[in-house]
Image (cartoon, rainbow, N blue to C red):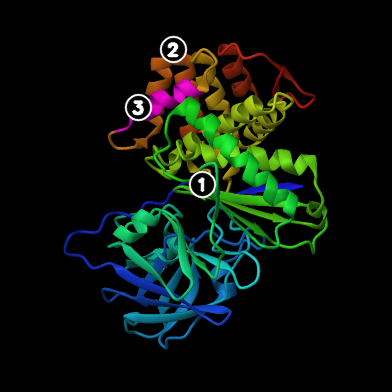
Amino acid sequence: MRLVLALLALVLLPVAAATAQPVEVTVQRDGEAFLAEFTLPRAAPAWGFFRSSPDAGTQQSWRLQSWRVLTPGVALQRRGSFDAFVSTNARPVPLKVRVRFDPFTGDLLADYVPALRLGGRSVAVFGGHFALFSVGRPDVLDRLSSSGDPRLMTDTGTGVRFRGGNLRLAGDVEGYRRGNSEGTYGLYDVPKAVVRNGVATVLDGDLPQWIADDLASYSPRVMQSLTARLGPPGITQPTILAAWEGSQRDGVSMNGGTLKGLILMRFEGRQALQPIPALADMAHWFIAHEASHFWLGQSIHYASQRDSWIMEGGADLLATRTVRSLNPAFDPRTKLNEGLRDCAQLGNQPIATAIDRNQVRANYACGVLFALVAEKVSRGDFYAFVRNLIAANRADREVSLDEWLTALARAGGTQAQVTTIHAMVERGTPQPKATIANLLRGSAIPFVLDQNGVPQLQ
């Protein structure tokens, strides 16, 4: 059984200057495939895609597997960490580029799934994957890190418009209408949502009925629990979008992510056809993690992807505490100790650069360790720590490492705790097991060492 978590962080593109023209993209259905037309506002020899995380299975570009450029004089290439439109002659990329693509529904290494199939002809397409920036030379892309460099990139924004009949939207719909969406899916031929107890569900018609019933009943309970402890999330009606990937494979798997007001889930595997308590438990924890991002990720978000551990580790601990409150039989140590084991493996390098190394898991694993410390200094109430973190950063809605550490110190954290966490984030530690043990010990969090010397909560 595996759980693949897509990167939950929001990629906010820089605001375009008042006189600058954005890239304009229209997406429409063409039979079972789709057409995307890019209108580029300026001449450039290459245009890179901001969101260029590779296919998690092959580690290769998913666009090269599913897109076909129809416009002469331009090619889709993988250049360094980015997919890009690159001129095939000495002239700039044409100002109109047309692409035909098949919906790619595979997992990405660290981003939202490009498309979801929801039974029959129902397809959801993610608009964020069409955002572009230009560079002065194609070889600039070859040396850019995955986080980019604004000095070498020209970004005047990207406006995406879905076209066609029987079309609806999910995600940051208000932002989509304003032209500055934080992430929106275009829903083509998708049934209307079913609303129960303030939570809307859009379910694949082929999803096993026991999963559909469980999602509809459990999701409102999670939202009610989190809202009671953290305050209103700032969204009027959260939506669950759940897809069924089929029963062809043995076993069972689940993955997904979250956008503004939207939780994405995908289920797959022959064993999932019948009720499985372990899968239900996994789904419950997953819903709680993703719902936690309505606060840690949307009410406030990180200032840089270097700080994504704040959102991911915090959401992990909020999920663990929330599920336990709804199900006293749930043992939180299983998830938390998994995080400590993974942090012991990944903490020898800076957590801040984990995404650049394709070690996204470090943000969750070490992030939950830091959240445990914050919980302890907050008299065992991590919800209180998050409430105060949101209140202190409400003006710009961004939280950096320094701001998080300030909140830790304000809650009662020691200088030793602040120094240790800062070092792990910025430099890593040569002895992760010992550093984790010292951090837990200094926080009066009980633990034992397993046979490999890894601290585990008692």
Quadrant occupied by the C terminus:
top right
Measure the alpha-carbon separation of dots 2 and 3.
Answer: 17 Å
Q: Is residue 376 above or below residue 2?
A: above
In this orientation, does residue 431 appear? Answer: no
Dot placed on the residue nearer the N-terminal end, 3 or 1:
1
Whether residue 407 sits left or right of residue 81 in the image: it is left
Pointer 1 residue: 8
- Residue type at mark 2 is Gly
Measure the alpha-carbon separation of dots 3 and 1.
Answer: 22 Å
Q: Position of residue 401 (x, y in %)?
A: 41, 31
Between disc 3 and disc 1, the foreground one is 3
Pointer 3 residue: 391
**Residue at image point 47% right, 69% down:** 167
Dot 2 falls on a residue whose secondary structure is loop
- Residue type at mark 3 is Ala
Tag of residue 364: none
Q: Position of residue 190 (x, y in %)?
A: 55, 66
Measure the alpha-carbon separation of dots 1 and 2.
Answer: 29 Å
The answer to which quarter of the image holds residue 104 is: bottom right
Q: Nearer the viewer, residue 186 or 455?
A: 186
Magenta-tinted stretch: 383-394
Pointer 2 residue: 412
Name the chief secondary structure element in magenta: helix
Whether residue 115 sits left or right of residue 285 in the image: it is left
The answer to which quarter of the image holds residue 18 is: bottom left
Dot placed on the residue nearer the N-terminal end, 2 or 3:
3
Residue 246 is covered by the magenta coloring: no
Q: Are marks 3 and 1 in contact (CB under 8 Å)?
A: no
Q: Position of residue 284 (x, y in %)?
A: 66, 39
Dot placed on the residue nearer the N-terminal end, 1 or 2:
1
Neighbourhood count class around disc 3 (C-alpha, 10 Å): few under 14, some 14–19, many 20 upward: few
Q: Nearer the viewer, residue 300 or 13?
A: 300
